[in-house]
Amino acid sequence: RKEVEQDPGPFNVPEGATVAFNCTYSNSASQSFFWYRQDCRKEPKLLMSVYSSGNEDGRFTAQLNRASQYISLLIRDSKLSDSATYLCVVKRAAGNKLTFGGGTRVLVKP
Amino acid sequence: DAGITQSPRHKVTETGTPVTLRCHQTENHRYMYWYRQDPGHGLRLIHYSYGVKDTDKGEVSDGYSVSRSKTEDFLLTLESATSSQTSVYFCAISDMEASNEQFFGPGTRLTVL
């Protein structure tokens, strides 16, 4: 079983709609959680960190559920420019390495 | 954008040849990482460095070696390239004491024939 698992998608989303997807992690010692965004043939870039209380950054909302070991990302009012692959990333309490999920592809269409 | 570059950006080589990829940073970050990205596997850590001459293995280190003789440079070497090492290679840097964020280079697309 992979340490971080994501639905690969693609999620086809009409422009202006809301889309949400989850990521599950297997290691209960995981401490920190992030969403990275990766455009086609580009490098990953940090989208947002995920805090225990949930957090929002503009149209993006991230949630963490430690009991069920998953994190989620919700995108409201989707824009064409939101089309990308979203990578779920987990960091353990010990060490300085990140573990990446395989990514969820989102395609926003007019 | 973080000052991180990779060279070469594209390379085609033959099985059995040695290959060295270079990662260069201008941010003076302590930590540097090499990942490979393949369909169905996501990003997987090959090796990482936590200082000059200090390196450690990641989850897919077999067939790869690294060196870091200066803070700004982290080299990844494939001693004898195999077709299974065809991949996109990303270098990343971080200043873990200050932030958990990793900044990635633009990637190197390597094809081993």
Image (tube, rainbow, N blue to C red):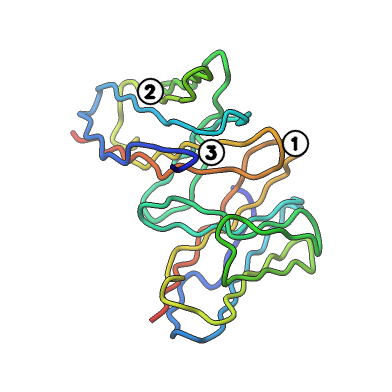
Q: CA distance from mark 2 to mark 3?
A: 16 Å
Question: The residue marked by circle 1 belongs to what chain?
Answer: B
Q: Which mark is residue A68?
A: none
Question: The residue marked by circle 2 belongs to what chain?
Answer: A
When asked about the image quadrant of residue B75, the answer is bottom right
Q: CA distance from mark 2 to mark 1?
A: 27 Å
**Going from the N terminus, do you reach mark 2 or mark 3 first?**
3
Q: Amino acid type of disc 1?
A: Ala
Q: Which residue is mark 1?
A: B98
> Residue B10 versus residue B75: which sits nearer the camera?
B75
Q: Callout 2: helix, strand or loop?
A: strand
The residue depicted at 45 percent of the width and 83 percent of the height is: B13
Residue A1: x and y in percent read 44, 42
Within 10 angstroms of label 2, few (less than 14), some, or many (20 or more) residues? some
Q: Which residue is mark 2?
A: A74
Residue A86's place in the image compared with A16, above or below, is: below
Residue A74's place in the image compared with B94, above or below, is: above
In the shown orientation, is residue A84 left or right of residue B88? left
Q: Which residue is mark 3?
A: A46
Residue B52's place in the image compared with A80, above or below, is: below
The residue depicted at 43 percent of the width and 66 percent of the height is: B87
Q: Amino acid type of disc 2?
A: Leu
> Residue B26 versus residue B87: which sits nearer the camera?
B87
Q: Callout 1: helix, strand or loop?
A: loop
Within 10 angstroms of label 3, few (less than 14), some, or many (20 or more) residues? some
Q: Amino acid type of disc 3?
A: Leu
